Image (cartoon, grey):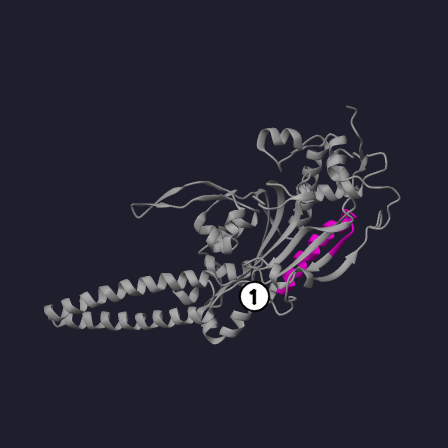
């Protein structure tokens, strides 16, 4: 694989330097495209020189001119060493260039986000409260389904035990979502929750210091051509992190696409520097469970599949009868590999505002280039587009259910679509302590 074939397409940068510079700026990421092109020019110059020297070496070798052949060999070794160094420098520079936002993405910080639509619950709209709602932690502790105090004793702050009907509610959400998604052609998968460092680099979420948000587990030594190579293992931040790279260095048949997966896993994040109400209860914790959708699609089907993925996430909210809004993120809020992200924000009565519960994104061919994932289009090999989207962030969905389905006496109604998974239980009632 050459420099032009992976990561960001160097040919595109050569032909569109101002577009790339502006796209990075729109994401609030500082890059110097001119510097990248200078390194690229040096790289091409050295490539040409090495090719010429190799041809001369071969010519002198055939002529059995030992003295000239030795001189050429010495020059070639120096040039090859220089080429390797420049290639590595170019490789590192290209890794720092983010994916370009789509033209439809609002430019700016989070104040520039675009609310696409709002959908109100039929049972209890956001404005339809005739008592002061409790927050999910107070409800959960009174119902004896959330225990953060014992979790803090065992694991530290921002961990929790889900128990009794709380645990059953999680299993119900999983069964409900998996059942719907399998009917839509999604392959259920339980992925590994540890990934190698080189895989994290391919995904692109660890750039610009974001690796500090993920847990380094251990140093992992793998044997490669008789040499031990350090390759640390990280805990995943979502199932997507190990599902996307499962097809690294593979080529799909065109008829296989779209390839759809729904993965369930625990997710682990440091969430460093986050304080206040967000850290109360299970809204923002270091470990949470999640159902994540991942798709590998042909480029011309990206938008269609992305809208379908969004409609699936919306359908879950509608089935649970929760009030929500769709928000198109502005450019500075996009993740490094994302070209577009639409969030579903669900109404949280205790906070009197909408909070993110789902994200649906396209990374276009950005991750596919970094991980070398292609498909056959006739005799031609092309890069796939990769999509990801939340089916359920379990903890946040439980927060939304507890707060939106609470009754004045502290009990919580079970959403109708989940009752069959809980032995037809209709309500969770406070426990006597």
Choose between 73 and 293: the one closer to the eye.
Answer: 73
State the image quarter where residue 281 is shown: top right
Residue 244 location (% of width, % of height): 53, 53
**Quadrant of image for the C terminus:** top right
Queried whether the magenta region covers residue 309, the answer comes back as: yes
* Residue 85 in view (yes/no): yes
Choose between 224 and 236: the one closer to the eye.
Answer: 236
Q: Give the residues drawn in magenta, as a range.
A: 303-325
Farthest residue toward the top?
433
Choose between 258 and 265: the one closer to the eye.
Answer: 265
Residue 159 location (% of width, % of height): 62, 36
Q: Is residue 307 left or right of residue 71?
A: right
Asked if residue 155 is positioned above or below residue 116 in the image, the reply reads above
Asked if residue 335 is positioned above or below residue 50 in the image, the reply reads above
Estimate how packed mark 1 is, as few (under 14), some (14 to 19) or many (20 or more) residues with alpha carbons within 10 Å. some
**Quadrant of image for the N terminus:** bottom left
Residue 195 location (% of width, % of height): 48, 45
Asked if residue 55 is positioned above or below residue 247 in the image, the reply reads below
Queried whether the magenta region covers residue 78, the answer comes back as: no
Q: Is residue 134 left or right of residue 110?
A: right
Farthest residue toward the right?
130
Choose between 8 and 297: the one closer to the eye.
Answer: 8
Residue at position x 64%, y 66% from top? 105
- Total labels drawn: 1
* Residue 253 in view (yes/no): no
Which residue lies under the disc numbered 1? 299
SS at badge 1: helix
By secondary structure, the bulk of the magenta-drawn segment is best described as helix
């Amino acid at each position: 694989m050459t420099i032009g074939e992976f990561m960001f397409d160097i040919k595109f940068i050569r032909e569109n330097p101002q577009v790339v510079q502006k796209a990075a700026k729109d994401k609030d990421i500082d890059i110097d495209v001119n510097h990248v092109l200078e390194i690229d020019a040096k790289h091409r110059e050295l490539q040409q020189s090495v090719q010429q020297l190799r041809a001369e070496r071969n010519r002198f070798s055939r002529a059995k001119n030992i003295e000239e052949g030795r001189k050429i060999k010495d020059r070639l070794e120096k040039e090859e060493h220089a080429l390797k160094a420049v290639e590595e420098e170019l490789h590192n520079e290209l890794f720092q260039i983010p994916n370009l936002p789509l033209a439809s993405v609002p430019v700016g910080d989070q104040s520039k986000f675009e609310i696409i639509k709002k959908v109100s619950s039929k049972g209890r709209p956001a404005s339809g409260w005739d008592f002061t709602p409790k927050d999910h932690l107070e409800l959960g502790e009174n119902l004896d389904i959330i225990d953060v105090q014992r979790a803090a004793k065992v694991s530290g702050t921002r961990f929790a035990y889900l128990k009794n009907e709380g645990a059953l509610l999680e299993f119900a959400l999983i069964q409900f979502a998996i059942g719907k998604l399998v009917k839509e052609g999604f392959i259920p998968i339980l992925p590994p929750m540890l990934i190698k460092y080189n895989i994290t680099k391919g995904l692109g979420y660890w750039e610009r210091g974001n690796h500090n948000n993920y847990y380094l587990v251990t140093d992992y030594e793998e044997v490669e051509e008789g040499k031990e190579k350090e390759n640390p293992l990280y805990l995943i931040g979502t199932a997507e992190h190990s599902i996307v790279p499962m097809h690294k260095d593979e080529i799909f048949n065109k008829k296989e696409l779209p390839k759809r997966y729904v993965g369930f896993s625990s997710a682990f994040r440091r969430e460093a520097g986050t304080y206040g109400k967000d850290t109360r209860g299970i809204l923002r914790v270091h470990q949470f469970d999640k159902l994540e959708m991942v798709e590998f699609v042909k480029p011309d089907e990206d938008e269609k599949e992305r809208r379908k993925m969004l409609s699936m996430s919306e359908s879950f909210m509608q089935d649970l009868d929760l009030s929500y809004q769709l928000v198109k993120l502005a450019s500075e809020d996009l993740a490094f590999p994302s070209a577009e992200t639409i969030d579903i924000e669900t109404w949280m009565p205790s906070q009197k505002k909408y909070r993110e519960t789902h994200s649906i994104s396209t990374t276009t061919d950005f991750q596919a280039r970094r991980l070398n994932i292609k498909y056959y289009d006739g005799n031609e090999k092309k890069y796939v587009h990769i999509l990801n989207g939340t089916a359920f962030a379990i903890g946040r969905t439980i927060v939304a259910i507890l707060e939106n389905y609470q009754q004045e006496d502290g009990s919580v109604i079970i959403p109708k679509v989940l009752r069959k998974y809980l032995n037809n239980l209709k309500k969770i009632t406070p426990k006597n302590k």
